[in-house]
Image (cartoon, rainbow, N blue to C red):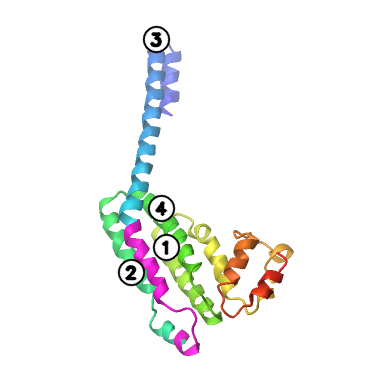
Amino acid sequence: MAHIDCTKLFSQGIGGEQAKAKFDSCLSDLAAVSSKFRDLLQEGLTELNSTAIKPQVQPWINSFFSVSHNIEEEEFNDYEANDPWVQQFILNLEQQMAEFKASLSPVIYDSLTGLMTSLVAVELEKVVLKSTFNRLGGLQFDKELRSLIAYLTTVTTWTIRDKFARLSQMATILNLERVTEILDYWGPNSGPLTWRLTPAEVRQVLALRIDFRNEDIKRLRL
């Protein structure tokens, strides 16, 4: 709006063409500097995420390994009463991000939480792919993931479900009663669901279920 008003003044003969050229040049320089500052800010946040947040978050995610997801009914019920992983993980995240929230502007803090949630999604996926599950363990993971997504949705304006789409689809696979049930969700049966996992990755996740036979997984037509 200011640029339009100034252009109007120049067109009325105030300042002349030379002044208008200088003004346009200054605006161009200002835009370039603004873009450079945005790049520097993003670079700084990325560095902060990798050097300050990742070293803290990674051990909390790796503690997933210490919780068995090959469980019986008794253990599943005990997990419900005494959550063994996700609630402590959420508490740790909350405490860490509170420190940054106190010292950063709302916009910059939100950008940092966006990077943090992407980091959590990527690292948690790595851990899940190195774990094993039975049916109840798959159900437990689904509950853990839902709790984590619900929490992260409250702390950032970024679209969390999109970042965790792959993990949510892994949870769906780990909850199947039988191998062939995946066909109810795949291909022409996928409906509005857009699969983020390749056929090879679907088989990889199915193989995490200790009660699914490799022959049945290989036989699938995906």
Query: Is there any visible trace of residue 181 in the rendered image?
Result: no
Q: Nearer the viewer, residue 56 or 35?
A: 56
Query: Is there any visible trace of residue 105 in the rendered image?
Result: yes
State if disc 4 and disc 3 touch (CB < 8 Å): no
> First in sequence: mark 3 or mark 1?
3
Q: What label does residue 18 carry, if any?
A: 3
Can you tell which quarter of the image residue 29 is in? top left
Marks 2 and 3 sit apart, C-alpha to C-alpha, by 61 Å
**In the rendered image, the vertical position of residue 184 relative to residue 16, given as above or below:** below
Q: What element carries label 3?
A: helix
Q: Is mark 2 on a helix, strand or loop?
A: helix
Q: What element carries label 4?
A: helix
- Residue at 39% over, 67% down: 62
Q: Residue furthest bottom?
A: 74
Q: x, y percentage for residue 68?
A: 44, 79
The amino acid sitting under disc 3 is: Gln
Marks 3 and 1 sit apart, C-alpha to C-alpha, by 54 Å
Q: x, y percentage for residue 185?
A: 67, 68
Marks 4 and 2 sit apart, C-alpha to C-alpha, by 18 Å
Of badges 2 and 3, nearer the viewer stands 2
Q: What stretch is highlighted in magenta?
A: 54-76
The amino acid sitting under disc 4 is: Leu
> First in sequence: mark 2 or mark 3?
3
* Residue that label 4 marks: 115
Q: Which of 90 and 141 is in front in this view?
A: 141
State if disc 3 and disc 2 touch (CB < 8 Å): no
> First in sequence: mark 2 or mark 1?
2
* Residue that label 1 marks: 152
Q: What label does residue 91 carry, if any?
A: 2
